[in-house]
Image (tube, rainbow, N blue to C red):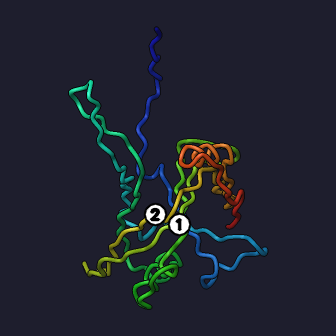
């Protein structure tokens, strides 16, 4: 038996230690310099709330030789509740507002996000997850300033990897993603290994 030795500088992550980037490729002023590149912007100014709910789903089962039920985690239904000011000169906000304004549906409501743990280095960047999410806008209210409220609903499996906040390059962790896919269905997953942007 052994015991974990507490670190002298134990710290708690702050909200600023988890960054969110949105793919804004094709928006005005966000044209990539090279073919195949992606352009990302950090969701910071104008965003007042971004709350993740992993949405772990459980299945209960009781065995005949036990008095207590077991709860197993079987799947996830992640979502992120958000609030942001209608700061219309920001491309990430404009992308959300266009979904409301043009009453978009289906794939036209899906955006690509990268969630970055700035407290954990990985490769030449930080530990990150790339995901596609459908945007559901629930309200457009005013509190002097106009406020957009809604939810990002995850679409499919997230891609684990690292993100370089200087170069805007996301690199998938093939080993971790293959392991996750094998755990789900006994196979391997095909993922894009690199997305670049600025």
84 relative to 114, above or below = below
Q: Position of residue 185 (x, y in %)?
A: 56, 49
Q: Nearer the viewer, residue 150 or 32?
A: 150
Figure disc tally: 2
Give the distance between the C-alpha atoms of the residues marked 2 and 1, in whole angstroms.
Answer: 6 Å
Mark closest to the chain's N terminus, 2 or 1: 1
Residue depicted at x 61% and y 43%: 179
Quadrant where the C terminus sits is bottom right
124 relative to 115, above or below = above
Mark 2 Cα shell of 10 Å, populated few (<14), some (14-19), many (≥20): many
Q: Position of residue 111 (x, y in %)?
A: 52, 72
183 relative to 99, above or below = above
Outermost residue on the front side: it is 64
Q: Position of residue 160 (x, y in %)?
A: 59, 50
Res 139 → quadrant: bottom left
Q: Nearer the viewer, residue 83 or 145?
A: 83
101 relative to 115, above or below = below
Residue depicted at x 36% and y 58%: 51
Whether residue 172 sits left or right of residue 49 in the image: it is right
Q: Are marks 2 and 1 in contact (CB under 8 Å)?
A: yes
* Residue 132 disc label: 1
Q: Position of residue 112 (x, y in %)?
A: 55, 68
- Residue beneath label 2, please? 154
Q: Secondary structure at mark 1?
A: strand
Outermost residue on the bottom side: it is 102
Residue depicted at x 35% and y 50%: 57
Q: Secondary structure at mark 2?
A: strand
Whether residue 106 sits left or right of residue 36 in the image: it is left
């Amino acid at each position: 038996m052994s015991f974990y030795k507490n670190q002298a500088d134990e710290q708690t992550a702050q909200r600023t230690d988890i960054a969110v980037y949105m793919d804004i490729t094709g928006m005005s002023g966000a044209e990539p310099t090279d073919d195949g590149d992606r352009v990302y912007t950090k969701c910071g100014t104008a965003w007042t709330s971004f709350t993740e709910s992993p949405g772990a789903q459980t299945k209960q089962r009781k065995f005949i030789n036990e008095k207590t039920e077991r709860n197993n985690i079987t799947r996830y239904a992640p979502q992120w509740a958000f609030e942001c000011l209608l700061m219309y000169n920001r491309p990430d906000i404009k992308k959300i507002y266009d979904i409301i304004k043009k009453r978009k549906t289906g794939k036209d409501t899906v955006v690509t996000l990268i969630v970055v743990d700035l407290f954990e280095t990985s490769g030449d960047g930080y530990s990150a997850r790339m995901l596609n999410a459908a945007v559901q806008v629930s309200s457009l209210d005013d509190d002097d300033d106009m406020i957009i409220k809604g939810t990002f609903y995850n679409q499919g499996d997230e891609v684990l990897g690292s993100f370089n906040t200087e170069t805007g390059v996301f690199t998938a962790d093939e080993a971790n993603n293959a392991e996750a896919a094998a755990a789900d269905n006994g196979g391997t997953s095909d993922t894009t290994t690199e997305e670049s942007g600025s």
